[in-house]
Image (cartoon, grey):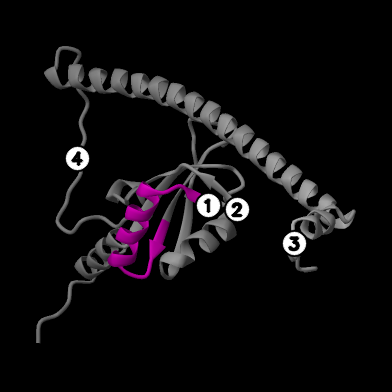
Amino acid sequence: MESTNPEAEKYREFMEKVERTVYIDTLPPQANESVLKTGLDQFGDVKNISFIPNYMDPRNSMRCALVEMKDPNQAKNVIKTLTDSPFMIAGMPRPVRVLPAELEMFDDRPRKPGRKITFKWLEADHPDLKVAKDMKRAVVRHATEAALAHKQHLEEEEKLHKQQVEILKANYKKYEVVDGVISDGTAQRVAKRYGMRVADD
């Protein structure tokens, strides 16, 4: 009987976890673990939710999370549904981005069996140093672009919020009008005038 390599087995289990996990970002601050679980339970069994700190935004006004489902099929269903439709949070539709999870998103990812990481100091004229500097500039540029995209998203969120508030106010006014004409007997008088029946309930 072949002996199982514990390191390889641990990595295999981790890869299975990655396959059944989805990444969700641009979540509003009120989207805590309870809210997320309630919203995603309709797609299957939510096994675990881990929020990822946003170090680029000290206010943490937008959140992102890794959500582990029971199996890969449930994870794919979450991605497909929330890509096509907004995510309902506290009764309000919120646009979020949902993607398959990737290895680099997990802080607790185990080392891949057989993989070795080495490092060395580079001389000033070493060609790899230029590559490293280019990567550093790319990171800075990405941070700037991400900050701009984040600002635009906040503006869209605010615009959506105002639209939703106006819709709620308009619907409530309609309800008040309907309730008023029923309460003061106007609906009954109009119904009687035109030979219609109006249910009391």
Relative to the observer, which residue lies in front, 84 or 40? 84
The mark that comes first in sequence, 4 or 1, is: 1
Q: Which residue is mark 3?
A: 195
161, above or below 69, in the image: above
Q: Secondary structure at mark 4?
A: loop
Q: Which of the two labelled residues, at mark 2 and mark 4, occupies the earlier sequence position? A: 2
- Marks 2 and 4 sit apart, C-alpha to C-alpha, by 51 Å
**Image quadrant assignment for residue 146:** top left
Question: Which residue: 72% across, 40% down?
Answer: 169
Q: Nearer the viewer, mark 3 or mark 2?
A: 3
Q: Is residue 106 left or right of residue 130?
A: right
For the residues labelled 3 and 2, the Cα–Cα distance comes to 40 Å
Give the left or right position of residue 25, taking residue 169 as reference. left
Alpha-carbon distance for marks 4 and 1? 46 Å
Secondary structure type for disc 3? loop
Residue for badge 4 = 118
Looking at the rendered image, the disc whose residue lies closer to the viewer, 4 or 1, is 1
How many neighbours does mark 4 have within 10 angstroms: few (below 14), some (14-19), or many (20 or more)? few
Indicate the amino acid at tag 4: Thr
Query: Would you say the residues marked 1 and 3 are in contact, meaning their CB atoms lie under 8 Å apart?
Result: no
Instruction: Tell me the residue that label 2 is attached to.
Output: 91
Distance of label 1 from label 3 (alpha carbons): 44 Å
In the picture, measured across the screen, residue 103 lies left or right of residue 5, that is right
Q: Judge left or right: residue 171 versus residue 9.
A: right
Residue at 34 percent across and 65 percent down: it is: 74
Q: Are marks 3 and 4 in contact (CB under 8 Å)?
A: no
Q: Which residues are magenta?
A: 67-88
Q: Along the line of sight, which residue is nearer the eye, 63 or 4?
A: 63
The residue identified by callout 1 is 88
Q: Nearer the viewer, residue 102 or 95?
A: 95
User: Disc 2 vs disc 1: Cβ atoms closer than 8 Å?
Assistant: yes
Q: Amino acid at mark 3?
A: Gly
